[in-house]
Image: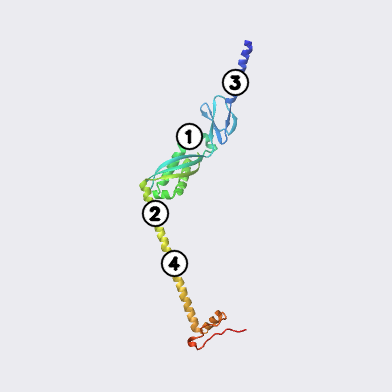
């Protein structure tokens, strides 16, 4: 091959390669659910890049994607109750970075603020809340503890991060404390059961008294009615008679007060 043609091909190939490198270094793609932070020679741009394709200054500008989706991470806090019992709480934090705070979070907390901002504030909030409750109440009122700690953590973090929720996974106590709380809960359940049985017995006794009083009152009313109207007994017999003559017709067989069937 002619050396001149070979030299031209080398130059052309170099130009094409340089063009490809130039195009690749001057463009970027931000994946869905992310925003881009532009850093030019160590200086962070105050405006983030939206998801999708974009262009930048080649070679000197880097685009770093930051997730704005909800994220979930685990952490733990060593707390003390109001009765000075050590309690270890394991939890999961659901959070996301707002768009308008992406650049600030990247500058102050290296893009992912969980370890440097979220975890310490959540642990601090939990310690403040548990310090006001006994160990037993912390175990019994997990949902209340979580809600109060969530509100406190949101106040501490402000608008830098959106804390969606806290999920308490485990509350660890010493074995001795767990046994003591369990024994107390069993005693409370037994006491509640005994109180229920007592209340049931009292209700049944009151019902029996009311029933007995009602029956006594009914007997008294019937007796008084019989005294005032002796013919009431005969009326009741006639009302209840089924038309069949009785086998026994009276005391001493005298036939007094005999009832005979009516003929058509």
Measured Cα–Cα span from mark 1 to mark 4? 69 Å
| CA separation in Å, label 3 and label 4 | 97 Å
Which quarter of the rendered picture does the C terminus lie within?
bottom right
Residue 20 position within the rendered picture, expressed as x and y whole percent measured from the top left: 60, 23
Asked if the residue under mark 3 is in contact with the one under mark 2, i.e. CB atoms within 8 Å, the reply is: no
Separation of residues labelled 2 and 3 (CA atoms): 79 Å
Q: Identify the residue at image location x=42%, y=63%.
A: 199
The label nearer to you, 2 versus 1, is 2
Q: Of the two numbered discs 4 and 2 on the same chain, state the one appearing first in sequence.
A: 2
- Of label 2 and label 3, which has the lower sequence position? 3
What residue does disc 4 label? 204
Residue 203, position in %: x, y?
44, 66
Quadrant location of the N terminus in the rendered image: top right
Between the C-alphas of marks 3 and 1, the distance is 38 Å
Q: Badge 3 is on which residue?
A: 17
Sequence-first tag of 1 and 4: 1
Q: Badge 1 local density, few (<14 within 10 Å), some, or many (20+)?
A: some
Which of the numbered marks, if any, corresponds to residue 109?
Answer: 1
Q: Dot 4, how many residues are within 10 Å of its Cα: few (below 14), some (14-19), or many (20+)?
A: few
The reply to whether dot 3 and dot 4 touch (C-beta < 8 Å) is no
Q: Spatial distance from mark 4 to mark 2, Cα to Cα? A: 27 Å
Q: Earlier in the sequence, mark 3 or mark 4?
A: 3
Mark closest to the chain's N terminus, 2 or 1: 1
SS for callout 2: helix
How are the residues colored?
A: rainbow
Question: What residue sits 61% from the left and 20% below the top?
Answer: 16
Please determine whether, in this image, residue 234 is positioned above or below residue 116: below
Measured as percent of width and height from the top left, residue 6 is found at: 62, 13
Please say if 16 is above or below 125: above
Residue at the disc numbered 2: 186
**What residue sits 60% from the left and 31% below the top?**
53
How many residues crowd around disc 2 within 10 Å: few (fewer than 14), some, or many (20 or more)? few
């Amino acid at each position: 091959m002619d050396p001149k043609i070979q030299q031209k091909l080398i130059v052309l190939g170099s130009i094409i390669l340089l063009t490809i490198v130039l195009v690749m270094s001057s463009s970027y793609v931000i994946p869905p659910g992310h925003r881009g932070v532009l850093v030019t020679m160590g200086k962070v741009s105050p405006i983030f890049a939206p998801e999708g394709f974009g262009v930048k200054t080649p070679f000197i500008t880097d685009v770093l994607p930051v997730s704005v989706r909800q994220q979930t991470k685990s952490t733990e806090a060593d707390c003390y109750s109001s009765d000075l019992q050590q309690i270890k709480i394991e939890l999961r934090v659901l959070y996301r970075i707002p768009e308008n705070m992406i650049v600030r979070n990247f500058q102050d907390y290296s893009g992912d603020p969980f370890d440097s901002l979220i975890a310490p504030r959540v642990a601090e909030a939990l310690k403040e809340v548990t310090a006001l409750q006994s160990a037993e109440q912390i175990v019994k009122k997990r949902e209340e503890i979580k809600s109060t700690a969530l509100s406190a953590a949101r106040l501490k973090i402000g608008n830098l991060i959106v804390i969606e929720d806290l999920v308490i996974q485990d509350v660890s106590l010493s074995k001795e404390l767990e046994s003591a709380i369990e024994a107390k809960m069993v005693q409370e359940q037994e006491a509640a059961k005994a109180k229920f049985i007592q209340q049931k017995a009292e209700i049944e006794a009151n019902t029996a008294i009311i029933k007995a009083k009602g029956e006594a009152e009914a007997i008294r009313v019937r007796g008084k009615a019989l005294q005032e109207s002796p013919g009431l007994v005969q009326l009741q017999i006639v009302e209840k008679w089924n038309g069949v003559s009785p086998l026994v017709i009276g005391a001493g067989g005298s036939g007094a007060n005999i009832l005979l069937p009516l003929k058509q």
